[in-house]
Amino acid sequence: MSSQLNVDTIVDKAGSGGTNVKIANTSVTVAEGGSATMNTVQGLCKAWANTSGGGTVAVDDSFNNASVTDNGAGDQTFAFTNNMNNSNYSCNAMTIENAVIVIIQILGQSSSNVNPKSHSTSASFDVIGKNYSVHGDLA
């Protein structure tokens, strides 16, 4: 037997219809047709940023990203608005670059920031843009 819940509107407890309604359930699971399920809260991206600028970096769009510090060529530290639970999260970073092969090295990650650095084949390198995303548990 299965159950189904159909809802047109979720309204906060006070009935004001505010946009900051929170669903306090950390065990919401979904199935994708098979027998496996996934915890949707743990599967969400907790922070990301899209940057541009070869030299002076600018954050073009982001989520849970408070600021960026330029530490030198290719080296930026991204501070989170809301900290991660610890430093054991997963971080992915990629560069946006047209003509140079560039790699990303994560110099460090803490509960409050992540530090991806871009390198060309032999030296630190300012790229046209850099993207990062973080998956893990918020504090």
Image (tube, helix red, strand yellow):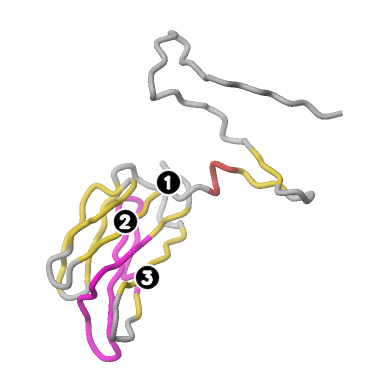
Mark 1 lies on residue: 85
Please say if 14 is above or below 48.
Answer: above
Mark 1 vs mark 3, foreground winner is 3
- Left of 68 or right of it: where is 86? right
Write down the quadrant of residue 31 in the picture. Answer: top right
Please say if 17 is above or below 38.
Answer: above
Mark pair 1, 2: CA separation: 19 Å
Q: Secondary structure at mark 2?
A: strand
- Left of 7 or right of it: where is 57? left
Q: Residue sitting at 87 percent across and 28 percent down?
A: 1
Circle nearer the N terminus (1, 2): 2
In the rendered image, residue 103 lying in the magenta stretch gets the answer: no
Residue 75 x/y as whole percent:
22, 71
Residue 111 x/y as whole percent:
35, 51
Q: Amino acid at mark 3?
A: Met
Q: Amino acid at mark 1?
A: Asn
Q: Amino acid at mark 2?
A: Ala
Q: Residue sitting at 31 percent across and 68 percent down?
A: 116
Mark pair 1, 3: CA separation: 24 Å
Write down the quadrant of residue 70 in the picture. Answer: bottom left
Please say if 13 is above or below 19.
Answer: above
- Circles 1 and 2, Cβ within 8 Å, touching? The answer is no
Highlighted magenta segment, given as a residue range: 105-132
Mark 3 lies on residue: 94
Residue 132 x/y as whole percent:
36, 62
Relative depth, front residue between 40 and 105: 40
Q: Quadrant of the C terminus?
A: top left
In the rendered image, residue 121 lying in the magenta stretch gets the answer: yes
Disc assigned to residue 49: 2
